[in-house]
Image (cartoon, helix red, strand yellow):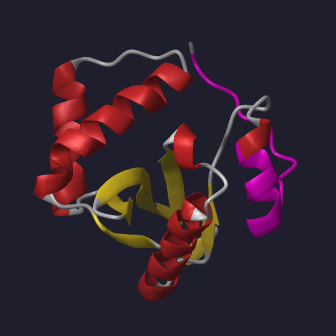
Amino acid sequence: MTVVRGLEKSDEAAWQRLWADYLSFYNTELSQQVTDNLFERLLTGEPHFGFVAERDGEIIGFVHALPHATTWSENGYLYLEDLFVDPSVRGSGAGRKLIEAVYAEADKRGHNRVYWHTDTGNETARALYDKLATLSDFVQYRRS
């Protein structure tokens, strides 16, 4: 059975392994300093927070989210920034439970919206997302 709970200091080694796999999935490299700073911010809950999915004592996934103010709501939004489940256990319901944990946290904090982005070719994840959220028509632009 998969349990979702807040990230703890003792999760660092397992989280680091999954984080490296997540970055690899997106063909991205970050310095160890960026990774270490992120983990510390996730532990303090400022500004990010994180949950992990655990099965039989093993961390199998994580989610990170960032609350923020918005001009369109008095209560702010919650950006689900990172979500990853070990490929060996995908389809087990862990991803759904992690998203639902973020939804519950958003409700607890009074945020009006939870949103996230994914790569258009991430079909496995998008099959789950289509069941839990509505696809937006918005297009993202970035400064290079």
> On the rendered structure, is 22 left or right of 35?
right
Front residue of 100/143: it is: 100
**Looking at the picture, does residue 114 appear above or below residue 18?**
below
Question: What residue span does the magenta drawing correspond to?
Answer: 125-143
> On the rendered structure, is 27 left or right of 6?
right
Residue drawn at x 64%, y 68% is 72
**Looking at the picture, does residue 104 appear above or below residue 65?**
below
The quarter of the displayed image where residue 87 is located: top right
Q: Can residue 4 be seen in this view?
A: yes
**Farthest residue, direction left:** 9
The quarter of the displayed image where residue 31 is located: top left
Q: Is residue 70 visible?
A: no
Identify the image quadrant of the C terminus. Answer: top right
> On the rendered structure, is 50 left or right of 63?
left
Q: Where residue 115 sits in the image (x, y, percent)? A: 63, 58
Q: Where residue 96 sits in the image (x, y, percent)? A: 62, 65
Is residue 53 on the magenta stretch? no
Residue drawn at x 26%, y 43% is 14
**Looking at the picture, does residue 120 appear above or below residue 127?**
above
Front residue of 129/75: it is: 129
Residue drawn at x 54%, y 24% is 25
Q: Where residue 34 sits in the image (x, y, percent)? A: 23, 28
